[in-house]
Image: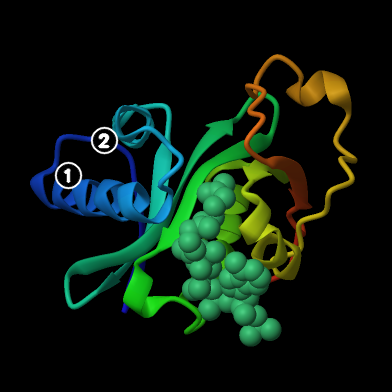
Amino acid sequence: LKFVCYSNDGIDQHMVWLIGLKNIFGRQLPNMPKEYIVRLVMDRSHKSVMVIRRNQVVGGITYRPYVGQRFGEIAFCAITADEQVKGYGTRLMNHLKQHARDVDGLTHFLTYADNNAVGYFIKQGFTKEIHLERDRWQGYIKDYDGGILMECKIDPKLPYTD
Ligand code: ACO
């Protein structure tokens, strides 16, 4: 099992994994238009942290780092149906936090969580209260009425992965 983070860089193996992830999002996020999913997953300003098992993608998180604002927006998060509730979602989020802090220099995440995923995000340290100053994120993330805006502060020191 491994965790990797790539964006659309034209490398064959990375593209195969990103297409696999796009297909998982398509199945697990039925309210999201498929063209919108493929556009963001393949957009070079987005990155995807993926769980890889036996060289197959099991799930992932696609996010956009706003490095100048020091926050990231999580666009999509999913684990393939037969691998849910085995702890992959938690480990994935921990790898995302570690990468975003140590590589991108981010301090916070924001996401529009689907109603049924709010419980998962709360377990990952997200809150419905937004503490990040409005002028750091307003105008950067698009309003989306299908979900609830949630925030997570990344601990500056905590080792999130082993
Ligand atoms: N509601 C409440 N609690 C949940 C949910 C949920 N939908 N999903 C998982 N949990 C809990 C688990 O019970 C577990 O609790 P525990 O630590 O007390 O045992 C904890 O959250 C972590 O569980 P994991 O096994 O790590 O989570 P999993 O691997 O299943 O990944 C995920 C969670 C990503 C939500 C997965 O279930 C999934 O893909 N669901 C369908 C797609 C989805 O809803 N994605 C999020 C949409 S919002 C967005 O993308 C911005």
Amino acid on which the number 1 mark rests in the picture: Met
Q: Is residue 132 above or below residue 18?
A: above
Q: Going from the N terminus, do you reach mark 2 or mark 1 first?
A: 2
Please state the horizontal and vertical placement of residue 86, each as a whole percent of the image.
47, 84
The residue where tag 1 is placed is 15
| Residue at the farthest top position | 139
Three-letter amino acid code of the residue under disc 2: Asn
Q: Is residue 160 visible?
A: no
| 34 on left or right of 157 | left
Contact, CB < 8 Å: mark 2 with mark 1? yes
State the image coordinates of residue 132 (x, y, percent, origin top left).
85, 36
Report the residue that reaches farthest toward the front.
Answer: 31
Instruction: Name the quadrant where ligand 1 sits.
Output: bottom right
Mark 1 residue element: helix
Q: Is mark 2 within 8 Å of ligand 1?
A: no
**Which residue is pictured at 62% across the width and 59% down the height?**
117
The local crowd at label 1, few if under 14, some if 14 to 19, many if 20 or more residues have their Cα within 10 Å, is some
Residue drawn at x 49%, y 53% as measured from the top left: 77
Which residue in the structure is indicated by mark 2?
Answer: 8
Question: Foreground residue, 157 or 128?
Answer: 128
Question: Could you say whether the residue bearing mark 2 is in a helix, strand or loop?
Answer: loop
